[in-house]
Image (cartoon, rainbow, N blue to C red):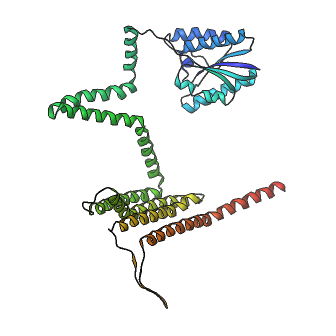
Amino acid sequence: MATLVVCVDRADDIGRKTGLETPVVGWEAVRSLVTDVGLADPEDSSVNSLLETLRVARDLRDGDEEAVVAVVSGASDSVVGADRAVALQLDDLIAEYDLDRAVVVIDSAEDERLVPVVESRLSVDSVDRVVVRQARDIESTYYLLKQFLADEELRQTILVPVGLAFVAFPALALTYSPAVGAATITAVIGMFLLYKGFSIDDVLTDLATQTRDALYSGNVSVVTYVVAGGLTLVGVFVGALAASDLGNVEGVVLPAMRFAYTAVPWLTTAGVTASVGRILDEALTDDRTLSSSSINVPFVVASVALVVRGFSGYFLERAGIFDRFTVPATNVGAVTIESFTLGTGERLAVFVLAAVLLAVVGVQVAAFLTEPALDDDAMDDDGDDIETRS
């Protein structure tokens, strides 16, 4: 069994600059590769990584341990293709040289993402990170700035916001005051940093892609989502109006309870509408299979709404904003139910009990609607077993 000392190059910088195909295996081959990479790009840190790979292999051999030196790279246009290319090269090396452990040499954070690929095949004893020491003088700083300005993505991310801040500050300072200008620029820069830090741009891009795919796919949920959004806006508006009608009420608890009590029916209708659209999409697919979780969502939303409305009504009734709930007299056939009044705790108990019963009904309905599909799958499995035995 031997130890693989491997230099990984996820971006295939070595292959692109030298024109060689990986894996490159053997002491002399890697040593010759150092010269080729150095002549192609003397500033590339891959030269130092290759030299570190040779040094580690030499130290292992001096300790009477068998070591195999190799260089692998991800020669592909995509990230997944690059990782798969490295995985295939590692599999070939393991099959040819009977390897059982490895020492990985990297020079960047991008290359470090290949460490799990190596760990899935070999026991990794060490990860050697090569950090190149640079001269910290004015000349090296000049070249670093030159390389920074040559990167278009970095220019747009850093220089554009800074330039806009420098342009906007004098205008705001002359129009209003320097304090207003400084506060505005600071707030905008903070929002930009949060925008980039939370990757909101990626979220918006994914949302736009999903929306476009949903529009072209003709899903019913697109319409129901729009309706749900409108119902949500109505609920928020109606709840805000109800909370503002309380007048000069001290604190925020009672306005919040009033908002919740009034807005919950609209918000619940929005949630049920959106979930029904999702169920219709599943029902109209080719296999026409419904998942129990999708069917159970409307019942869960309605149950939570009952609990929220019950507790918010409880607080409002205890505060004297609502009167006690009176059930009117009702005639059911020959049975006559006289009018009666529910106490504060009794009313809350009715809402909680109704929510629990509705949740149980949702579970039963979901199990009933998905049970035939499970039975069909079981029958298919039994049929397959019978055909196999015959």
Res. 61 in view: yes
Q: Image height check: is 71 above or below 87?
A: above
Q: Residue at x 52, y 24 (%)?
A: 109
Q: Nearer the viewer, residue 316 or 296?
A: 316
Q: Residue at x 58, y 8 (%)?
A: 35
The answer to whether residue 2 is left or right of residue 330 is right
Residue drawn at x 69%, y 63% is 375
Q: Residue furthest left?
A: 175
Closer to us: 124 or 142: 124
Vertical comparison of 50 with 85: above or below: above
Q: Quadrant of the N terminus?
A: top right
Residue 250 locus on image (x, y percent)? 28, 57
| Residue 290 appearing in the image | no
Considering every residue shown, the one lying at the far bottom of the view is 334
333 lies above or below 35: below
Q: Position of residue 333 (x, y in %)?
A: 49, 89
Q: Position of residue 296 (x, y in %)?
A: 54, 61
**Quarter location, residue 306:** bottom left
So how many labels did they put on this image?
0
The vertical placement of 327 against 296, above or below, is below
- Pick the residue in front: 194 or 344: 344
Where is residue 330, by image quadrant? bottom left
Where does residue 349 sit, x and y in percent of width and height? 48, 69
Residue farthest along the right direction in this orientation: 390
Side of 8 where 171 appears, left or right = left
Which image quarter is the C terminus in? bottom right
Q: Quadrant of residue 199?
A: top left
